[in-house]
Image (tube, rainbow, N blue to C red):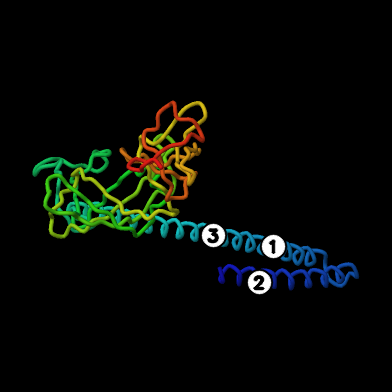
Amino acid sequence: MQQARAVVEQAKANEEIAGTTDQRWARLVDRGVIPKQSGDERRSAFLARKAETAAANAAHTTSEANVVSRTADLRAAEANVQAQIANVRRLERMQGFEQVLAPFDGVVTERKVERGDLVASGSGGDRNLFTVAQASTLRIQINVPQSYAVDLRKGQTAEILVRERPDRTFTGTIARTAESLNAGSRTLLAEIQVDNKDGQLLPGMYAQVKFSVPRTRSVVVVSADSLVANSQGTRVVIVGQDNRAHYVPVTVGRDLGAEVEILSGLKGGEQVISNPPDTLADGQQVQLQGEKKG
């Protein structure tokens, strides 16, 4: 590039001096001092120098194009080198798959290939070679009913009962919950983590989970046969201080079998009539069992 640029500068200088000489000789020819032949020779020399300048400019332009072309070739070669390096790294990683390493310590619980089986890249699909289980800490997933879900908190403990270990109760901790009820079952998915370093529990076992859940509010528990359910709603019959029966509307909570929770309607301490007859009227005089008539 520098040599071509120097040739251009030299050609321009030669053209300039040839042009000046041509102009001087043309004036001398016009005055008749020198013959016209000499003036034509200087004119031809000037045109030759001008052509040399044009040729030098063309050569310089060609040199610049060659430089651009060589630069592009160099960049293409560098890109090709980077592509080859990336391909080498890919092959190295592919070769590294000859040795299968588990991401954590554990026990191989399932083997889907044996020695001598062909395992090609991309031929396995979704097929895994091994299944590894880490049983030092087990996770139990349980669906908690809506009536209990509102009182469940992360970090609470739970008792784990396994039929195959009848003489032992395991303790787990609520690690996380879905924080949302399943729309179909109206249950909350909770995960309990259990310490299993001694290996007493096996992955895949069925277990019973018992929560000790504190109630967010106090409730009253009455016997299930105390409820009177009819067209007037769900009620219980209490005995007032005047020894008269009074029907009280109640809201029922959890069904505990022989007993039920009363969420509203009773404050606690009321005398509730068990299995009241259909003929019992509101305000009717009653006598408590064991109480003598006055």
Label 3, secondary structure: give it.
Answer: helix
Label 1, secondary structure: give it.
Answer: helix
- Which residue in the protein does label 3 denote? 68
Where is residue 139 drawn, in percent x and y? Answer: 26, 51
Where is residue 22 drawn, in percent x and y? Answer: 79, 69
Three-letter amino acid code of the residue under disc 3: Val
Q: Earlier in the sequence, mark 1 or mark 3?
A: 1
Disc 1/disc 3 C-alpha distance (Å):
30 Å
- Which residue in the protein does label 1 denote? 48
- Viewer-side label of 1, 3: 3
Q: Earlier in the sequence, mark 1 or mark 2?
A: 2
Q: Earlier in the sequence, mark 2 or mark 3?
A: 2
Three-letter amino acid code of the residue under disc 1: Ala
Q: Is residue 103 above or below residue 277?
A: below
Along the line of sight, the residue nearer the viewer: 111 or 63: 111
- Which residue in the protein does label 2 denote? 9
Where is residue 75 drawn, in percent x and y? Answer: 46, 59
Along the line of sight, the residue nearer the viewer: 105 or 49: 105
Three-letter amino acid code of the residue under disc 2: Glu
